[in-house]
Structure formats: C-alpha cells, structure tokens
C-alpha cells in the first residue's frame, strides 16, 4: 500500500463518530475491546468491530494481551505521530468533507458533556473566515499544531487521578482565494 493509499485508509477509518471517540480514548490508554465498550457504552461486539477497522488502517497497535476467562484479550492503543500534522493527509475532496462532517457533528455531543461548575466552565469558541498576512496564518497554524501535540502527548487513561476531561476540535486551513466572498470584508456566500 502506498503512503497516499495508507493515509486515505486512515481517513476512511476515522470518518465515523464512534471511531473518533475510540482514538481519543486510546491516545492515553491501552484498553481491550471490553474496556472500550464499557467506557463508551456500546456492545463489546460493536467495539471489537470498530477497533479491528482502526487497527487495519494502522491507527491502533496491539499493546499487549491479557488473559480473560480462559481466553486472550488484545489491548489496543492509538498510534499517534506527533511529527505528522493531522491535516497532512492526501485524499479526495469527498473523503475530506466526510471527515469534516464527522468532526463537526461531534462538537455538539462533546459540548453537551462540558463541565458546568461555576469557575471551572472554561470554553472557547472562535470562527474566522478572514484575509490575513501569510505570516499571521503560519503563526496561528503553528500555535494550533503545538496545542494539539501538547494535548495528545498529555493524554492519560480515563478518570486518572489529577486529570480533567477536555476537548479540542480544530479545523484550520487556507482557503481558495478565488472562491466565496472576494470583496467587501469577511464572510462567505452560499454557492
């Protein structure tokens, strides 16, 4: 499989809300299908199916095995490459759009699960479709990439003492200068 085909396979594997949750869960933990199923409140068969797809796409590795009632259960963990930016995935426009839709659909579910205690309910929303200097765009991209790497590198197993559950959903990309609103400020029109 070529590098391009491998990355397209990754994209297809992640274009599902449950599999995105699994990747997040397994970034900081090594868990079996049964443990993933309990954590995400799905059946073990469903968890096992999705874990196999993610493993086949090269996004999970088998971190070990444990004995369970006379059998063996694989423990999986997310293969997260801090050196490769997540946006660096060649794919078709249709596949990229499907991935973007899955990410966008995950935000309301995650937001509904936000912490609401006074003094702890930090949330940040920003939306921008702007014209900026290339240097500003590069700096923003670098800062968002750094935040993503830091969050992923800091991931721990669910409910680990001294941790908080957090979400970071980002879509950052340069836009085609010839499409959308080209005059009169920011904003975009429907096409």
Image: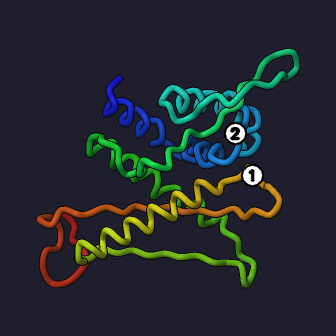
Place residue 151 in its image quadrant: bottom right
Q: Depth check: 19 or 84 in front? A: 84
Q: Residue at x 15, y 84 (%)?
A: 184
Tag 1, which secondary structure?
loop
Measured as percent of width and height from the top left, residue 84 is found at: 42, 47
Q: Residue at x 52, y 36 (%)?
A: 59
Measured as percent of width and height from the top left, residue 171 is found at: 40, 61
Place residue 127 in its image quadrant: bottom left
Measured as percent of width and height from the top left, residue 130 is found at: 27, 76
- Given contact means CB atoms under 8 Å apart, are the residues at marks 2 and 1 in contact? no
Tag 2, which secondary structure?
loop
Place residue 93 in its image quadrant: top left
Q: Is residue 26 above or below residue 185?
A: above
Q: Quadrant of the C terminus?
A: bottom left
The residue that label 2 is drawn on is 42
Q: Quadrant of the N terminus?
A: top left
Q: Residue at x 33, y 49 (%)?
A: 97
Q: Is residue 109 left or right of residue 67?
A: left
Q: Residue at x 69, y 62 (%)?
A: 165
The residue that label 1 is drawn on is 158
Mark 2 packing: few (<14 Cα in 10 Å), some, or many (20+)?
few
Q: Is residue 187 left or right of residue 160?
A: left
- Mark 2–mark 1 Cα distance, whole angstroms, equals 16 Å
Q: Is residue 47 left or right of residue 158?
A: left
């Amino acid at each position: 499989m070529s590098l391009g085909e491998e990355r397209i396979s990754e994209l297809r594997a992640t274009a599902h809300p449950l599999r995105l949750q699994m990747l997040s869960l397994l970034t900081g933990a090594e868990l079996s299908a049964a443990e993933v199923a309990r954590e995400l409140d799905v059946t073990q068969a469903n968890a096992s199916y999705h874990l196999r797809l993610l493993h086949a796409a090269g996004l999970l590795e088998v971190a070990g095995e444990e004995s369970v009632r006379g059998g063996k259960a694989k423990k999986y963990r997310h293969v997260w490459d801090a050196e490769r930016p997540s946006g660096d995935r060649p794919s078709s426009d249709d596949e990229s759009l499907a991935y973007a839709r899955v990410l966008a659909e995950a935000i309301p579910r995650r937001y509904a699960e936000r912490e609401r205690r006074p003094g702890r309910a930090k949330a940040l929303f920003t939306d921008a479709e702007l014209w900026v200097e290339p240097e500003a765009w590069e700096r923003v991209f670098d800062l968002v990439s750094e935040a993503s790497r830091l969050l992923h590198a800091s991931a721990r197993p669910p409910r680990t003492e001294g941790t908080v559950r957090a979400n970071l959903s980002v879509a950052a990309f340069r836009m085609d200068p010839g499409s959308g609103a080209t005059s009169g400020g920011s904003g975009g029109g429907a096409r």
